[in-house]
Image: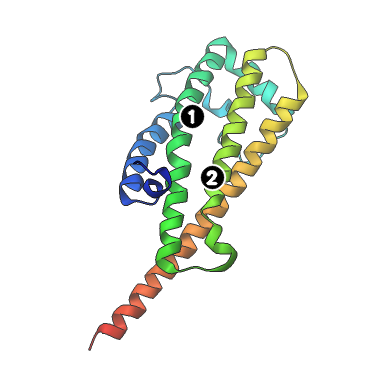
Amino acid sequence: MFDPAAFFKTKRFLLVSGCIALPLAAFLSTGGFGQLPVVAEKTMDPLFCYPPAIIHDYLDAQGQNGRAAYLVLHIVDYFFLLCFYPFLSSLLYRLNRTCTIRGPFSYSFVLPLAAGLFDLTENLFIDLLILLYPARIGLPASIASFSTCAKFSLLYSTFVMLLLFFAKWIFSSIRKNKRIAP
């Protein structure tokens, strides 16, 4: 029987999710390889933090075709979310087990999953605002804004943890090799 939790911990999962996430990231970061009429400078997703009021200005700047294309990009982004954040989580989990980290840092694999939930929330509320456009509703804009800040804070924390775990793994490997060498 297939065990998703066990599969999540495998090298195959890392390879498959990473190989899927990479081209999706390229597609998203280039606005659909330049084929979609999205004004890249007026998208909220890559901003670290922004005031909620800016969302409505950015949606105005996108125009009707840009807003429709933004929804298409988000459809691709939903697939990206399903690959990228579990990939990071699985990588942290494997490094954590390899480095035998104990204490609160041993749960750091949850950070990217939480970032993914905030990214999902951000996308859903931006999509809601696009679908309700031209209505200017403050609560969904505030939730999207907060979710973006939380997503990036957790994502940057994830990258810091990855760097720390990689450093510990490298230093442990070097020390282990020095003990073995005659």
Q: Is residue 57 visible?
A: yes
Cα distance in 3D space between marks 2 and 1: 14 Å
Rendered location of residue 126, percent (x, y) = 62, 25
**Residue 63 falls left or right of residue 72:** right
The residue indicated by pointer 1 is 78
Residue lying furthest front: 1
In the image as oriented, which residue stretches furthest toward the left? Answer: 182
* Residue most extreme to the right: 138
- Is the C terminus in the top left, top right, bottom left or bottom right quadrant? bottom left
Relative to residue 175, is residue 108 drawn left or right?
right
> In the current view of this chain or complex, which residue is farthest to the bottom?
182
Give the color scheme: rainbow, by chain, secondary structure or one colour: rainbow
Spot occupied by residue 162 in the image (x, y as percentages of width and height): 47, 58
Q: Position of residue 164 (x, y in %)?
A: 49, 64
When the figure is inspected, residue 57 is found, relative to residue 46, above or below; the finding is above
Q: Looking at the picture, which amino acid does disc 1 mark?
A: Tyr
- Residue at x 37%, y 38% (from the top left corner): 22
**Mark 2 nearby-residue class (10 Å; few <14, some 14–19, many ≥20):** many
Q: Is residue 44 visible?
A: no
Res. 80 image quadrant: top left
- Counting every numbered tag in the picture gives 2
Amino acid type, callout 2:
Leu
Name the quarter where the N terminus is drawn: top left
Q: Position of residue 103 (x, y in %)?
A: 57, 67
Checking the image for residue 113, the label placed there is 2
Residue at 61% over, 38% down: 118
The first of marks 2 and 1 along the sequence is 1
Q: Name above or below for residue 93 compared with residue 1.
A: below
Q: Nearer the viewer, residue 6 or 51?
A: 6
